[in-house]
Image (spheres, grey):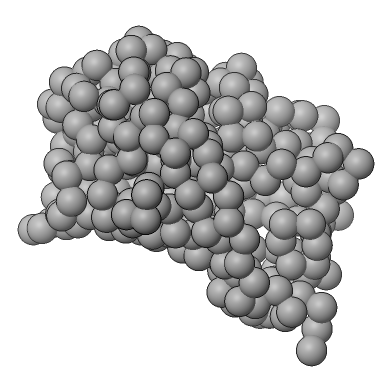
């Protein structure tokens, strides 16, 4: 048995207070009024602000993440990317509650792609409050070799039939803020020299979970209550490029995607109906109306 296979089935549990001040910092990062208070429901995807892998600095890897073998299986490839995942919203998370997350490594799979060897790590998360299930999540992280030079950004072409859309324009401060809020030390999001010279990106990279959060935000405002959400990172977005979050209804489901300025697909997603996720009015002080454009924004594919 390989060392990383010993991690399969291993679970760990942590609890955290869903502090309203953390949600208000996220609201400010999204250029919104920080009006959250205890009792308000947490918007979809904002749970990523609360559950962190807290590892001493001496046990971090050179990329800024906890070293492999600390919180993730010690697969033999170093370059980490957030590939995608699924979320099922079973009941609301409310600010002021104490939530408990149980994390289990479900699988570690080695694959061989056109760009080389890959390791896919599948992780399950279950979040509950007082034993009541709130969120069931599956997350896939992919590991690959470090590049030997600049990596061209390639991806499929995004569809052009959006029914509703929201443009976003980021800067390095927004990415730094989100890294801080999620305790994400991955240097590709704030260290441009590292992003270029080590991981081959043209500039700092927009976080995958931040893109997924913005997709859920658009879905909530145009589709309505979320029951399940699935997403897949398709290509990275780097500064200074902006992007659009787009969607189109398809019966009881809504297809969503993130597109770069040149029409490249950065993320694809889908939601369907079910449990009433928090409305933007109760969770962020803004009305739950379809969005065709956004005001000036300073928020936001790799982890």
Depth check: 297 or 124 in front?
Answer: 124
Against 49, is 136 above or below?
below
Q: Kindly identify the residue that appears in the image at 74 percent across and 79 percent down.
A: 6
Is residue 13 shown left or right of residue 191? Answer: left
Is residue 59 shown left or right of residue 200? Answer: right
Q: Which quarter of the figure has residue 23? A: top left
Q: For the view shown, which residue lies furthest in the front direction?
A: 130
- Measured from the top left, where is residue 76 in percent x and y? 83, 70
Q: Kindly identify the residue that appears in the image at 65 percent across and 77 percent down.
A: 8
- Measured from the top left, where is residue 236 in percent x and y? 57, 45
Against 168, is 69 above or below?
below
Is residue 139 shown left or right of residue 196? Answer: left
- Measured from the top left, where is residue 65 in percent x and y? 76, 46
Depth check: 175 or 152 in front?
Answer: 175
Whether residue 88 is visible to the viewer of this picture, yes or no, is: yes
Q: Kindly identify the residue that appears in the image at 50 percent across and 65 percent down.
A: 124
Total count of labels: 0
Q: Kindly identify the residue that appears in the image at 59 percent across and 22 percent down.
A: 177
Whether residue 248 is visible to the viewer of this picture, yes or no, is: no
Depth check: 167 or 190 in front?
Answer: 190
Q: Which quarter of the figure has residue 224? A: top left
Q: Quadrant of the N terminus?
A: bottom right
Q: For the view shown, which residue lies furthest in the right direction?
A: 58
Depth check: 33 or 114 in front?
Answer: 33
Q: For the view shown, which residue lies furthest in the left direction?
A: 251
């Amino acid at each position: 048995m390989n060392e990383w296979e010993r991690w399969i089935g291993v679970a760990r549990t942590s609890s955290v207070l869903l502090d309203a001040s953390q949600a208000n910092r996220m609201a400010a990062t999204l250029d919104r009024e920080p009006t959250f208070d205890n009792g308000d429901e947490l918007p979809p995807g904002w749970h990523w602000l609360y559950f962190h892998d807290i590892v001493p600095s001496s046990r971090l890897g050179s990329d800024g993440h906890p070293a492999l073998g600390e919180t993730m299986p010690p697969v033999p490839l170093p370059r980490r990317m957030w590939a995608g995942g699924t979320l099922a919203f079973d009941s609301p998370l409310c600010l002021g509650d104490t939530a408990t997350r149980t994390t289990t490594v479900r699988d570690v799979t080695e694959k061989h792609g056109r760009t080389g060897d890959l390791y896919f790590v599948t992780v399950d998360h279950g979040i509950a409050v007082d034993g009541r299930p709130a969120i069931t999540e599956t997350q896939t992280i992919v590991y690959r070799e470090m590049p030997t030079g600049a990596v061209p950004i390639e991806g499929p072409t995004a569809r052009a039939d959006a029914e509703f859309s929201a443009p976003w324009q980021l800067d390095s401060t927004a990415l730094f803020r989100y890294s801080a809020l999620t305790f994400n030390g991955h240097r590709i999001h704030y260290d441009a020299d590292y992003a270029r010279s080590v991981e081959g990106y043209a500039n700092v990279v927009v976080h995958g979970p931040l893109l997924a959060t913005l997709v859920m935000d658009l879905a909530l405002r145009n589709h309505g209550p979320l029951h399940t959400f699935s997403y897949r990172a398709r290509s990275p977005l780097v500064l200074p490029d902006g992007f659009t979050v787009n969607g189109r209804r398809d019966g009881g489901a809504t297809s969503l995607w993130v597109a770069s300025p040149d029409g490249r697909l950065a993320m694809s997603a889908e939601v369907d109906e079910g449990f009433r996720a928090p409305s933007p009015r109760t969770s962020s002080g803004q009305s739950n109306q379809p969005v065709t454009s956004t005001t000036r924004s300073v928020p936001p594919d790799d982890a």
